[in-house]
Image (cartoon, rainbow, N blue to C red):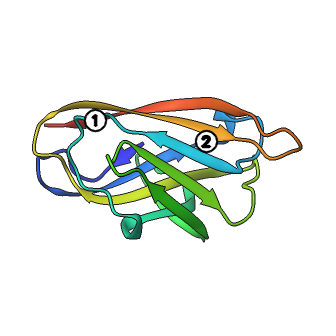
Amino acid sequence: YWQSSKEKRDRSTYYLVIRPKDRRTGILKLNITIPKYFDAYISPKKLTLCKVNLGGMLSRTKCTEKIPAIFEISKDQTKIEVFPESPISTEGSYAVVMKIFNPSKSGMFQFNATIQSPGDMPISSYVGSWSIDVE
């Protein structure tokens, strides 16, 4: 993942990246679970799904292509469901981009991701976690 700011109550952009080596199948649906004590407000309007170029020492992580998707957030703000218009292939890195204000409490927050694969019998599988740090 990549996070633009780690300061409490600061405006921040999160790139929750899913790389090709993290998955073996395409993505029909993506579920992201968020801890209850992550007290930031997440709006569906501030979420995007995109194909991403991963940055390094000389370049930044940035979106190259937006993927049309529907975002659903649970009432208690602990689950984000992402439904792309068409299944996402196994090639290339993809990211869910969140533009939010960081929580008012510092700490480390673990976001978990599961994907549902396309096919006759869709199966959900765990693809990884992101440890978000707020100071």
Secondary structure under the numbered disc 1 in the rendered image: loop
Q: Is residue 44 above or below residue 1?
A: below
Among the two numbered marks 2 and 1 on one chain, the one whose residue lies closer to the N terminus:
2
Q: Residue at x 62, y 58 (%)?
A: 83
Q: Residue at x 75, y 34 (%)?
A: 123
In percent of width and height, residue 114 lies at 58, 36
In percent of width and height, residue 99 lies at 32, 61
Task: Tell me if I can see residue 56 in this picture.
Answer: no
Q: Residue at x 48, y 42 (%)?
A: 32
Mark 2: which amino acid? Answer: Arg
Count of labels in the image? 2
Residue 122: quarter of image: top right
Q: Label for residue 66?
A: none
For the C terminus, give its image quadrant: top left
Q: Relative to 85, is 103 on the left or the right?
A: left
For the N terminus, give its image quadrant: top left
Residue receiving disc 2: 19
Residue receiving disc 1: 36
Task: Tell me if I can see residue 92 in this picture.
Answer: yes
In percent of width and height, residue 10 lies at 14, 55
